[in-house]
Amino acid sequence: MIKKIAVLGIGTMGNGCAIAFAIYGYDVNLWYHGDEKKLLATKGAMRQQLQVMAEEEFITVDNIDATLDRINLFSNLQKAVEDRDYILECAPEKIDVKQNLFKQLDEYCPSHTVLASNTSSLKLNDMMALVSEKRKPLMMVNHWYNPPHLMPIVELSNFGNTPEAVYKNVEFLYNSIKKQTVKVLKDVPGLVANRIQQAVAREAFSLIEQGIAAPEDVDKALKFGPAFRYATTGQLEVADFGGLDIWCTVGDNLLSIMDNSQCANKLLREKVKEGKLGIKSGEGFYKYSEEEIPAIRKRFIKKLIHQLKASEYYV
């Protein structure tokens, strides 16, 4: 049974994953190899996230300090992982970085430790190229969605290298922190959720580029149309309810005239070239004043908390 956890990295994903485990009582070592001042400051950032969760009564105020007390900060990798049962790396998406990191983990960790990557774009076989043959059956992709402490999905690789008992142990770990796990059977870029998301985004960007609807109306059509159902009902369930004959007919009528581009949309690329990157630059498809951004981010988080609480009814 997995009891002791280490999370590697203190970016948005690393911090959020550490919070998610610690809220449910797990002992978590959080490691960062850079500026120690940044490492020490990370609990302040996590406290802010926990305070919003307390405001929305997802956790109690008392649970804020208890959660943070379960998260131990480390700048020394060996000390962070030498007694852990499970490691989740949230390092940059660079294959050489991950290969060297897993090589070190293979040397430092106990023989039973499961090594997992949060990647959704790099292949598992490539990442474990430098680890021992004994460790390879204990390596997985465990991909979370952002923000990880609120989004309930975690995609778990089941590519054939992992014994069933190991997979079940990891699945139990995630079920114990109320995550919904998706078993991914093939090592493909994007896994499952990101591929679905990109398919939706491709058509949304195309509708704007063609002048068919403004950004706010494309978003409205999604939020109060398909996404309204998707919050509680999967696509295949929706198809069954609507009738597969209807879906087949509509597919024949629409798919041949919809966007089938094989690269990022031209409009999207132009915005990136202009430095219009979204909320982090103050403008993307919408404009954001610097004064409003903190409130906008907080409102986004609160909406996710409301949805997370509601979603538990539909599991």
Image (cartoon, rainbow, N blue to C red):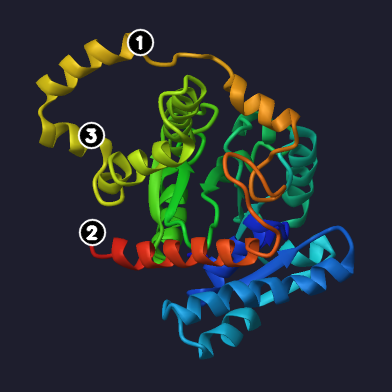
Residue 77, label in figure:
none
Task: Tell me the CA gap for discs 1 and 3.
Answer: 22 Å
The tag earlier along the polypeptide, 1 or 2, is 1
Write down the residue under mark 1.
257
Residue lying at 60% horizontally and 24% vertically, measured from the top left:
267
The tag earlier along the polypeptide, 2 or 3, is 3
Residue lying at 49% horizontally and 40% vertically, measured from the top left:
162
Write down the residue under mark 3.
236
**Label 2 packing within 10 angstroms: few (<14), some (14-19), many (20+):** few
| Labels 1 & 3 near each other (Cβ < 8 A) | no
Residue lying at 87% horizontally and 58% vertically, measured from the top left:
34
Identity, as a three-letter code, of the amino acid under mark 1: Ile
Task: Tell me the CA gap for discs 1 and 2.
Answer: 35 Å
Identity, as a three-letter code, of the amino acid under mark 3: Leu
The percent coordinates of residue 189 (x first, y second) are 55, 28
Task: Tell me the CA gap for discs 2 and 3.
Answer: 16 Å
Q: Is residue 52 left or right of residue 83?
A: left
The residue nearer to you, when weighing 290 against 159, is 290
Q: Which secondary structure, mark 3? A: helix
Name, please, the residue furthest toward the bottom: 62
Residue lying at 61% horizontally and 20% vertically, measured from the top left:
266
The residue nearer to you, when weighing 288 against 272, is 288
**Label 3 packing within 10 angstroms: few (<14), some (14-19), many (20+):** few
Write down the residue under mark 2.
314
The tag earlier along the polypeptide, 1 or 3, is 3
The percent coordinates of residue 156 (x first, y second) are 46, 44
The percent coordinates of residue 208 (x first, y second) are 48, 27
**Label 1 packing within 10 angstroms: few (<14), some (14-19), many (20+):** few
**From where the camera sits, is residue 82 visible?**
no
Identity, as a three-letter code, of the amino acid under mark 2: Tyr
Q: Nearer the viewer, mark 1 or mark 3?
A: 1
